[in-house]
Image (cartoon, rainbow, N blue to C red):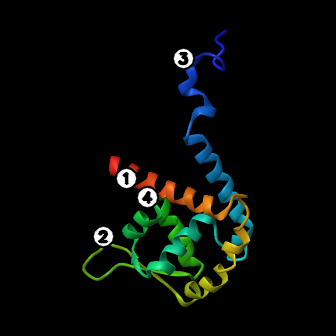
């Protein structure tokens, strides 16, 4: 039997040597940590990302939103339908352009922004690192995203 734990030949495929695994595991756990604070808003984490983008940038097309939050149309469409059903957004096709779908916040969606102010303080401290290190981590991850986008 091959002992891959000690054989250097297999070092490249050891879980502990991967960058992707701790990123994946941290992201999964962090999203789980968001569940409780987001219950008060009646939003999932992905819906929260969409709402933050709309609060920050205002109305936009589904395509623009998808790029901003890095979700494809197949994931975004049902999510947007649920947000519309909840009364937080409207979806409308501009006259003369059936291919574009324009998204806008409703009054209820805009009002939810005030309640959302409670989420960041509720999440503070879930990763027990100094604030400087958390900013460095965020900046490094954003830099990695830019480089990954450039490679495509």
Horizontal side of residue 89 vs 66, given as left or right? right
Q: Which mark is residue 9?
A: 3
Q: Which residue is mark 1?
A: 149
**Mark 4 sits on what residue?**
72
Q: Residue furthest top?
A: 1
Q: Is residue 136 visible?
A: yes
Which of these two is toward me, 147 or 65? Answer: 147
Q: Report the residue at 52% width, 70% height from top.
A: 50
Q: What secondary structure is found at the residue carrying circle 1?
A: helix
CB atoms of marks 2 and 4 within 8 Å? no
Return the residue nearer the eye: 136 or 101: 136
Residue 54 % position (x, y) = 48, 77
Which of the two discs, 4 and 1, sits closer to the camera?
1
According to the picture, the residue beneath numbered tag 2 turns out to be 99
Earlier along the polypeptide chain: callout 4 or callout 3? 3
Rendered view: 5 above or below 145: above
Q: Earlier in the sequence, mark 1 or mark 3?
A: 3
Callout 4 touching callout 1 (CB < 8 Å):
no
């Amino acid at each position: 039997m091959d002992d891959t734990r000690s054989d250097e030949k297999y070092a490249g495929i050891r879980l502990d040597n991967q960058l992707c695994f701790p990123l994946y595991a941290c992201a999964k756990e962090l999203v789980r940590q968001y569940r409780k604070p987001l219950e008060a808003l009646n939003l999932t984490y992905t819906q929260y990302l969409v709402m933050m983008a709309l609060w920050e940038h205002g109305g936009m097309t589904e395509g623009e939103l998808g790029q901003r939050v890095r979700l494809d149309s197949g994931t975004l469409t049902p999510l947007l339908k649920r947000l519309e059903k909840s009364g937080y957004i409207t979806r409308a096709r501009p006259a003369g352009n059936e291919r574009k779908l324009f998204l806008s916040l409703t009054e209820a969606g805009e009002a939810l922004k005030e309640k959302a102010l409670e989420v960041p303080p509720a999440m503070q401290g879930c990763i027990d690192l100094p604030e400087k290190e958390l900013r460095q981590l965020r900046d490094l991850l954003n830099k990695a995203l830019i480089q990954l986008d450039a490679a495509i």
